[in-house]
């Protein structure tokens, strides 16, 4: 018998699903490594870049995973990994990112946009991200042994404002409020570290959906940190004038990661009720940068409050505990923070008070009418 010949050379559907599955596991390994590294690199820019790479990689992985499910419809499954992929240091991270970039480019080059258009669409986006990451991850040096690693250009003080140690120290109004709010944003560095750390530590217990949301959480907290950093820089402050701390992260260092989740889910969103009022105060001062930063932060925090509630319950459940027992976790978080505060010395308070007073005075001196 005779037949018409094939008209295009195409990759088979089953092979396509397998190729996309392998890309998924590598993106997942990149996401987890970025989270795990965040507390161990000192420069804030490096923490922020790891956070962004984690988020972009989680988005690529999620799109790959959904596409594999489509190709295997009606079943929804991913093949098991042939071997556990673990990215252990920044060099291996860069190698993995460059390898993914090249493999996306090859996939795209060999793809057929009629039969496999949906894959090509996600591959193009992932390729663009990997090209950016391959550049941006370049400067990240060796991981430090101590966590949280702190950027020595700043005024390092675990307690980044006197009010953590002395409730009578005012939060401030006017210029002091603008400054205090920016210093708070900068000091969300602890939230960046907590989010990175739980992303990796709880990935196996909580599964892919958690990893995807924790990567977004990590990226959001890094944006809040950079918001503060930029406002302070643009007002002309130098890093050595700016307190940079992390007592909340220090309070749960070495503890079960459930407490980092508790700290992040509840302590970081604690001021959510004040944010509207603060953004209105900035509006009245004509400081539209602080106002808009605060509005976007507020939008992110409403998401985070929901993440915190949901994942804390799920984790308790996964561990065979009553999901409604989450208030116990928060009580322990509160205790850990109080213990850390209890270790502060009168010298710690005097030192941060002097820095904060000087910073408020410097801000007032450069305020405009
Ligand atoms: Fe935040
Ligand atoms: Fe948050």
Image: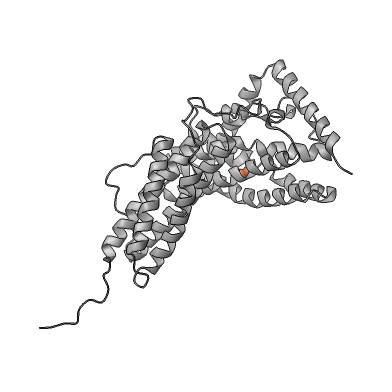
Q: How is the image coloured?
A: one colour
Residue at 57% of width from left, 34% of height from top?
Answer: 43
In the picture, measured across the screen, residue 365 lies left or right of residue 150, that is right
x, y percentage for residue 354?
Answer: 77, 22
Q: Position of residue 361 (x, y in %)?
A: 83, 30
Image region (quadrant) for ligand 2: top right
Above or below, comparing residue 247 to residue 200 in the picture: above
Quick check: 311 left or right of 358? left
Q: Quadrant of the C terminus?
A: top right
Relative to 354, is 82 on the left or the right? Answer: left
Residue 280 sits above or below residue 170 on the image: below
Against 160, residue 209 (above or below) is below
Q: Is residue 180 left or right of residue 149?
A: right
Q: Quadrant of the N terminus?
A: bottom left
Observer able to see residue 248: yes
Q: Is there any visible trace of residue 316 in the rendered image?
A: no
At x 41%, y 34%, the residue is 89
Nearer to me, 131 or 334: 131
């Amino acid at each position: 018998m005779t037949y018409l010949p094939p008209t295009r050379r195409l990759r088979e559907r089953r092979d396509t699903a397998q190729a996309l599955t392998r890309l998924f596991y590598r993106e997942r390994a990149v996401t987890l490594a970025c989270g795990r590294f965040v507390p161990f690199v000192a420069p804030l820019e490096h923490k922020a870049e790891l956070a962004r790479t984690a988020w972009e990689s989680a988005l690529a992985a999620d799109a790959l995973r959904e596409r594999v499910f489509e190709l295997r419809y009606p079943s929804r499954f991913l093949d098991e990994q042939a071997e556990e992929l673990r990215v252990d240091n920044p060099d291996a991270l860069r190698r993995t990112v460059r390898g993914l970039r090249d493999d996306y480019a090859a996939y795209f080059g060999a793809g057929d946009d009629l039969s496999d258009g949906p894959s090509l669409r996600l591959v193009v986006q992932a390729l663009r991200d990997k090209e950016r990451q391959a550049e941006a991850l370049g400067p990240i040096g060796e991981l430090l042994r101590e966590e949280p690693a702190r950027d020595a250009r700043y005024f390092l003080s675990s307690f980044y404002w006197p009010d953590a140690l002395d409730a009578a120290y005012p939060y401030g109004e006017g210029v002091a409020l603008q400054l205090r709010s920016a210093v708070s944003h900068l000091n969300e560095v602890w939230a960046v570290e907590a989010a990175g750390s739980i992303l990796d530590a709880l990935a196996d217990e909580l599964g892919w959906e958690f990893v995807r949301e924790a990567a977004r959480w990590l990226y959001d907290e890094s944006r809040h940190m950079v918001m503060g950093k930029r406002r302070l820089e643009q007002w002309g402050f130098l890093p050595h004038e700016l307190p940079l701390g992390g007592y909340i992260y220090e309070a749960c260092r070495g503890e079960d990661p459930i407490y980092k989740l508790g700290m992040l889910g509840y302590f970081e969103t604690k001021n959510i009720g004040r944010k509207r009022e603060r953004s209105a105060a900035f509006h009245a001062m004509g400081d539209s940068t602080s106002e808009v930063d605060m509005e976007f932060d507020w939008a992110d925090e409403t998401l985070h409050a929901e993440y915190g509630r949901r994942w804390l319950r799920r984790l308790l459940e996964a561990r065979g505990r009553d999901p409604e027992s989450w208030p116990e976790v928060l009580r322990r978080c509160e205790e850990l923070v109080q213990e850390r505060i209890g270790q502060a010395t009168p010298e710690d308070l005097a030192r941060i008070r002097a820095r904060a007073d000087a910073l408020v005075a410097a801000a007032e001196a450069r305020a405009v009418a």
